[in-house]
Image (cartoon, coloured by chain):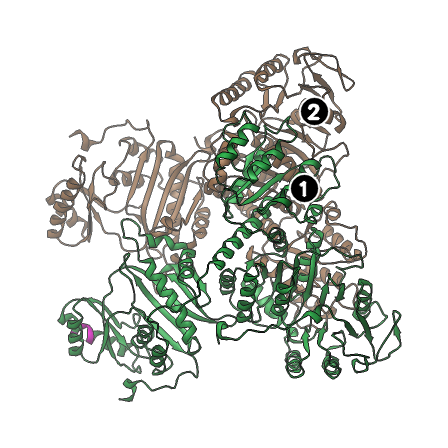
Chain colours: A green, B brown
């Protein structure tokens, strides 16, 4: 089922998961060399304000608290139970939780699906089944718990938190891996000066999954940016629902999705025991959803600093200033490589700058203060004010190389009062106050970067998000294109066996409103001649057999026939070739087809992705797809605007402009065909495992686009409508 | 002239520049608000051990030292004079330096070519002329001086150095920009724990240039890695000579070359007032020379940490280990994206690992210790030893997330005693010794990275350098290919006017040993028929005129003619079309040419680059070059191996394999043609501004490659040999 119909309405309510009024820890012990000891100590020392219940079969007292022999013995139904017992005891403990009406359980124990063993996989399936049956929602197994810095709740075994409180802020983090979530993302973000609110590391996602936690974070009023680290996306449909909610709330989601390379996909699979799906499809879906993909974890908190300022970049125009000319050049250079424009300043700004720096000609953007700054202590500050108020400037990038405390504090104040995103690039130290460090500024809510590349990357991402935000706000409801008759197409499809012939495939496409070549099946040479005469143009003859997929290779195609004799000869020839090529093939006849006028050949397709379901793909025919892998993907349905964006992603996009005197191509017709295909994927996707349109020939502007060849393969078991008439004879 | 002939034999001897026994500072003052005050103070406090002479027209005493009114008054000929006077006084001071036989002068003063004004450019030219005339070698103007941390000499105005000594190490830095050199590279490298030996920021390069300083650094025994930051390369020839020397000494050169984007090129030009040349050509030249290009300055010291270990990566196989499964996946994933392979461990290693972790199956690479490490304190250390001794492993990447001091110290010791490059990825902190920081390890000569991406980037670069090193060591002397007759080709070339016709261009190419199509010029239809008959194959007719460059667009080409009548008709047609298209064109006749058998069409070319001189280019014909910009470049001459590498760089390289039943192409013949072209560029490059071979048709394997069309344009003023016979009639 597709996400739009999947009824992903309810994410679980997780308030008591993160802020339990009572928390029990099963596997509690006073032995600090054990997980259960360290975890209990941490919960206690972190300042948990609810009722904390150690659970240990031996009872007694642990760290001054009464220990209970079982969850069943607790004096109340606990909101949340932490579990660190051996793998074979986990399910029993969970049954205890259900018996005592616990709301949530978090299982740190490993030894489940991640082992790749049948036993481990089966034990994990039993946890999932338990949760469905009992209503106790479970995080894990094989996870490293959660931290709520706001309410001082922790259940984890980690050296990354201590009893000294860290400031909270606007970031929350969900990861499947404990190490990546708590070290690479959380601890490092905190070290960089960012406050973190909530962190979960959810392991194998047997019941509650990373998207459930992300949903809670999007809902959390204090959280403005959500950082995800995922080895697998549990459900494309849930991701779409989550992203839609985040977009409406203007809360950017950043993601590090592992499995960019084949080696990484294999490693992720063996680590988590789960299929990870195609990376290019993930990449396309993230872009479609405004989810900002990062390569490494540090890039996420670097981008979060700027996105958390809660000001949307209105465009891609930035300005900077520096007393280091070399840094101005580097910023300009690398910024342009990340889609940053450096607009001319407006007339007012130029007038102010001319007053400030009379010996200068026109001041460039970014502004190089090399000489001007000498001898004028507040030159930097005055120029900063002048350019940051320029209406052409969407994002400010002041560069502090080695700055005075006064310049640095002025920059912070300017950033805080500005209505524009401010990315401060501070490469060096503070001249007169060496202890002052970037993290101090970050702690005041200012985005600070050490290196030019990381800075322009973050700015580029903020601009991407700004563009997505604007597009999302102005978005029209998606609408099925005219003449896309789903019922008619489905009826046509259901008449056919599993692998449709070209002619049958086109019948389905035509029913859904695609322009296909005029054609008719001929069973004799004379029929072929008659059809060719009716078509009244040059024709192609193509063998029609459900058993011959590669018509050209079997000698089953003749092109450009213009007279009756050639048609008759071609009929005999393609029939004979096909028989010689595949003596057992069932031959329905020969397709007599109008020759499409020459044009740009596109390949459109629909594939099935294990995470996102039906996905549409588009590329330019020939070597572009086959040799260069130049293909764009989208999760359907999409708008006309989306399908234009898809075409623009192709490296060969310029071919639509027409080269060397060729006329420009009908790009609108190409985009319309992709949009239509996306709706077909939505309407008939359950019944189709593969759909290829190859080629769609795109004519000159205004001349449209026509499906010249197509292949549909139905889903296993979906067939079984009427048998095809030709087989009944 | 080409670099191989350019006689770049002598780089200047700069020992007394960096370690002057006597140093005078012109513009010295006790006023610390002025450059001359701060610089003098810094030199004194930094611990200069030579004789320091303040120079100030007012004489007297400054900071306890006698001040001299002029350099002419100094008690000795100073080794080095620092100059911080106003721009209009600089040349006078330099004349004083010459009069007092100073060896070197460094001019910090700005206001020269970087202003872009005629005055500034002229003043700078006078400095260059002064240096040539007097023999006083000058750094600057518009520079920020130099620092010699080894001998404690500084002449600069910078907040990045203080009197507290920094440890020296194995890195030296040369930059044109003071800010980038001293802040982004030097100070940050030091903060990261790297020791730095020598730093120069050389500004406008009026006389001594960045490559001269780099040469000194390559020569410096203590320096093992040279870091360059360049807004422009002063001379391609010098860069080649420098790189050759560095390659022989096995001292990697790292470079941040600004001007990757057009916006960056414009900014660099306006900052330095100099042409910067084409970025793609720079990129190709760096790769050719084993110079490792980085995008931002931090990437340089990150790579330097590993390259400075002085162990060459023997291959692209790495191994890692971690107690964080997520970090193992991330490392695998991003590593593969940077060309890192993760080989299977050898049998011995597997046996050792099976003993250490009996509950595991086969341990993967990188090794995930998630569960195994629990309860065994030295598991990490034992696994580290086992895998680092594996013969399949070229580079080690242990991951410390949050480590104990013991694990971290063990890792440092393992890195120090290993014969393989060791890149330690330390994402977090130290559990039992929070003050321990990555920089402490770097200070002990160990490469430490905070983030996975920066780590695999550095490892990938070390592997690239290892591959370059091996290739350089095994390199055969470059040799002109057989039958490349430079004299014959030059004689042919000199007979022609500036723009050669296709036939003339091929005559030159044939003289140099290229296979060209059989063809002859016909002046009448009957002649054309006779020639066609002699060729005894299908022919093409092409109009031949020095005034018609685009033969096809003018209707001047007819292809695939197989009988005498068609040849005659075609002769009339192309002649008439050409006359109609360009009535004034001088028409020499019609070229009757054998039709080359179909094959893969390449475009080869020679362009002139302002920095590197003649450069050869190769791409696959059609959209690859025009739409996709898929072109590879090299600075000639190159070996056969180099030209294969050039073809392999092309995204469309797979087309050589032959698609869909096409036979594989004669890639050897294609590579040979590129190699030959590179020698032609070397031999005749001075006389040619443009050379295009389009297409070179590459046949099936063994069938060779033939030049089907070509165009040579001679250098302005180079023409004037014999007039072409056809014009004399």
Q: Where is residue B2 in the image (x, y as percent from the top left)?
A: 44, 33
- Between B376 and A527, which is closer to the camera in this rendering? A527
Residue B232 seen by the camera: no
Left or right: where A662 falls relative to A146 = left
Left or right: where A673 falls relative to A269 = left
Between circles 2 and 1, the one closer to the viewer is 2
Residue found at x 31% / y 52%: A658
Farthest residue, direction bottom: A729
Q: Does the magenta stretch include residue A622?
A: no
Name the main secondary structure of what is drawn in magenta. helix
Asked whether the beta carbons under mark 2 and mark 1 sit within 8 Å of each other, the answer is no
Picture quarter with the C terminus of chain B: top left
Q: Position of residue A557 (x, y in %)?
A: 26, 70
Q: Distance between the residues labelled 2 and 1?
A: 28 Å
Residue receiving disc 1: B189
Q: Position of residue B329 (x, y in %)?
A: 62, 63
Residue A313 seen by the camera: yes
Q: Where is residue B423 in the image (x, y as percent from the top left)?
A: 67, 52
Residue receiving disc 2: B33
- Between B527 and A488, which is closer to the camera in this rendering? A488
Pointer 2 indicates a residue of which chain?
Answer: B
Q: Residues within 10 Å of mark 2 (few under 14, many from 20)?
A: few
Left or right: where B2 falls relative to B534 = right
* A698 is higher (above) or lower (below) than B76: below
Q: What element carries label 2?
A: loop
Q: Which mark is residue B250?
A: none
Which range is magenta?
A568-572
Which picture quadrant has residue B42?
Answer: top right
Residue found at x 29% / y 75%: A503
């Amino acid at each position: 089922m597709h996400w739009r119909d999947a009824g992903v309405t309810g994410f679980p309510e997780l308030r008591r998961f993160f802020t339990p009024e009572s928390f029990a820890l099963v596997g509690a012990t006073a032995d600090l060399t054990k997980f259960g000891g360290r975890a209990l100590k941490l919960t206690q020392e972190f300042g948990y304000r609810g009722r904390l219940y150690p659970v240990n079969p031996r009872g007694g007292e642990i760290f001054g608290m009464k220990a209970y022999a079982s969850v069943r013995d607790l004096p109340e139904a606990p909101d949340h139970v932490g579990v660190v017992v051996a793998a074979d005891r986990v399910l029993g403990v969970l049954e205890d939780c259900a018996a005592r009406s616990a709301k949530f359980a978090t299982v740190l124990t490993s030894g489940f699906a991640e082992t790749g063993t049948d036993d481990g996989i089966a034990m994990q399936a039993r946890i999932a089944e338990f949760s469905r049956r009992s209503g106790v929602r479970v995080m894990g197994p094989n996870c490293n718990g959660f931290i709520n810095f706001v309410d001082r709740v922790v259940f984890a075994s980690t050296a990354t938190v201590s009893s000294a409180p860290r400031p909270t802020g606007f970031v929350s983090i969900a990861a499947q891996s404990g190490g990546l979530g708590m070290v690479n993302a959380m601890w490092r973000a905190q070290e960089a000066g960012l406050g973190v609110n909530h962190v979960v590391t959810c392991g194998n996602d047997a019941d509650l999954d990373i998207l459930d936690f992300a949903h809670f974070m999007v809902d959390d009023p204090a959280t403005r940016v959500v950082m995800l680290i995922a080895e697998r996306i549990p459900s494309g449909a849930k991701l779409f629902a989550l992203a839609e909610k985040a977009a409406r709330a203007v809360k950017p989601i950043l993601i590090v999705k592992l499995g960019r390379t084949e080696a990484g996909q294999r490693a992720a699979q063996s680590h988590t025991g789960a299929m990870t799906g195609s990376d290019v499809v993930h990449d396309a879906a993230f872009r479609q959803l405004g989810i900002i993909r990062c390569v490494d974890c540090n890039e996420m908190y670097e981008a979060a600093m700027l996105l958390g300022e809660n000001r949307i970049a209105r465009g891609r125009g930035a300005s900077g200033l520096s007393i280091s000319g070399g840094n101005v050049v580097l910023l300009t250079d690398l910024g342009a490589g990340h889609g940053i424009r450096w607009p001319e300043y407006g007339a007012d700004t130029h007038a102010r700058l001319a007053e400030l720096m009379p010996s200068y000609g026109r001041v460039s953007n970014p502004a190089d203060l090399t000489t001007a700054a000498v001898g004028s202590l507040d030159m930097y500050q005055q120029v900063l004010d002048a350019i940051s108020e320029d209406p052409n400037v969407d994002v400010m990038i002041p560069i502090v190389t080695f700055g005075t405390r006064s310049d640095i504090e002025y920059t912070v104040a300017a950033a805080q009062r500005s209505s524009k995103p401010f990315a401060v690039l501070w490469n060096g130290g503070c001249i007169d106050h060496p202890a002052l460090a970037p993290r101090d500024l970050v702690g005041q809510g200012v985005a600070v970067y050490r290196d030019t590349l990381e800075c322009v990357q973050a700015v580029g991402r903020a601009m991407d998000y700004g563009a997505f935000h604007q597009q999302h706000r102005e978005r029209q409801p998606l609408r099925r294109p005219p003449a896309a008759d789903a019922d008619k197409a489905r009826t046509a499809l259901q008449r056919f066996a599993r692998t449709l012939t070209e002619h049958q495939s086109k019948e389905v496409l035509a029913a859904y409103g695609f322009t296909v070549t005029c054609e008719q099946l001929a069973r004799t040479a004379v029929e072929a001649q008659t059809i060719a005469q009716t078509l009244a143009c040059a024709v192609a003859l193509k063998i029609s057999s459900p058993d011959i997929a590669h018509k050209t290779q079997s000698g089953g195609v003749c092109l450009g026939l213009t007279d009756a004799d050639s048609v008759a000869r071609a009929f005999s020839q393609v029939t004979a070739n096909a028989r010689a090529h595949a003596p057992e093939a069932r031959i329905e006849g020969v397709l007599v087809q109008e020759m499409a006028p020459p044009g740009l050949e596109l390949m459109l397709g629909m594939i099935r992705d294990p995470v996102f379901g039906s996905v549409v793909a588009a590329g330019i025919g020939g070597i572009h797809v086959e040799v260069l892998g130049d293909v764009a993907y989208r999760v359907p349905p999409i708008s006309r605007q989306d399908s234009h964006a898809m075409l623009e992603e192709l490296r060969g996009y310029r071919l639509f402009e027409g080269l060397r005197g060729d006329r420009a191509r009908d790009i609108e017709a190409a985009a319309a065909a992709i949009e239509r295909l996306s709706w077909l994927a939505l309407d008939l996707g359950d019944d189709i495992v593969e759909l290829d349109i190859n080629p769609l020939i795109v004519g000159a502007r205004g001349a449209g686009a026509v499906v010249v060849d197509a292949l549909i393969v139905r889903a296993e078991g979906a067939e079984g409508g009427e048998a095809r008439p030709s087989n009944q004879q």
